[in-house]
Image (cartoon, rainbow, N blue to C red):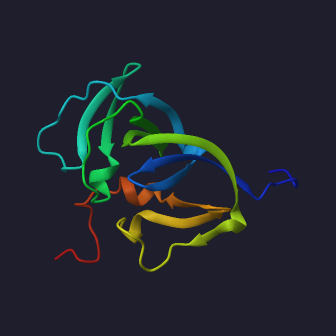
Amino acid sequence: MSEFQSNDVKVIVFQLKDEEYGIPVEQVRSIEKVQHITRVPKTSSYIKGVINLRGVVTPIIDLRRRFDLEEVENSDSTRMIIVSREDIEVGFIVDAANDVIDINQESIEPAPEVVGSVQAEYIQGVAKLEKRLIVMIDLAQVLKAENEPSKLSV
């Protein structure tokens, strides 16, 4: 680690409905156009299926469904953001991948108790940039399976 550490985090900004979300660039492998997705039986409703991405079978998650937003038809701007966490690659279907920006860590506030339509557990914080609010996604929570043991397990 160098002593010249920046307080900025580079983030891929994407859109779902009317909101902007961010994922740190180091967790993003690529951004792809939507391609044919092979359905997999008996998976969670938000898992669209799998794709063959450059020889790697990659599960695809519909983030609208995961966040309990209404589904829409794919458009020309619909993208798959391929993310990687702990050697697992997963694709997220998003409405659009807007841009790559630097966000100062100090402009990211903890997630408020009540956050619009996206469940607060998926949110790491909210970045305030001039006229924009960017919801920072907690990748670990989004990727956590619904059937993983939780405090509510009997």
Q: Nearer the viewer, residue 29 or 78?
A: 78
Residue at far left of view: 42
Which quarter of the picture shows residue 90?
top left
Q: Residue 40's x, y, as percent?
A: 17, 36
Q: Residue 66's x, y, as percent?
A: 30, 55
State which quarter of the image contains the C terminus: bottom left
- Above or below residue 118? Residue 11 is above
Q: Residue 97's x, y, as percent?
A: 49, 40
Residue at 41% over, 63% down? 122
Q: Is residue 87 visible?
A: no
Q: Residue 14's x, y, as percent?
A: 49, 46
Residue 8 is left or right of residue 68, and the answer is right
Residue at 21% over, 28% down? 38
Residue 23 is left or right of residue 104, and the answer is left
Residue at 73% over, 55% down? 8
Residue 52 is left or right of residue 102, and the answer is left
Q: Nearer the viewer, residue 92 or 20?
A: 20
Residue at far right of view: 3
- Above or below residue 134? Residue 58 is above
Q: Nearer the viewer, residue 123 or 114?
A: 114
- Above or below residue 12? Residue 32 is above
Which quarter of the picture shows residue 117?
bottom left
Count the labels in the image: 0
Q: Is residue 137 visible?
A: yes
Residue at far top of view: 55
Residue at 42% over, 55% down? 18
Which quarter of the picture shows residue 34?
top left
Residue at far bottom of view: 113
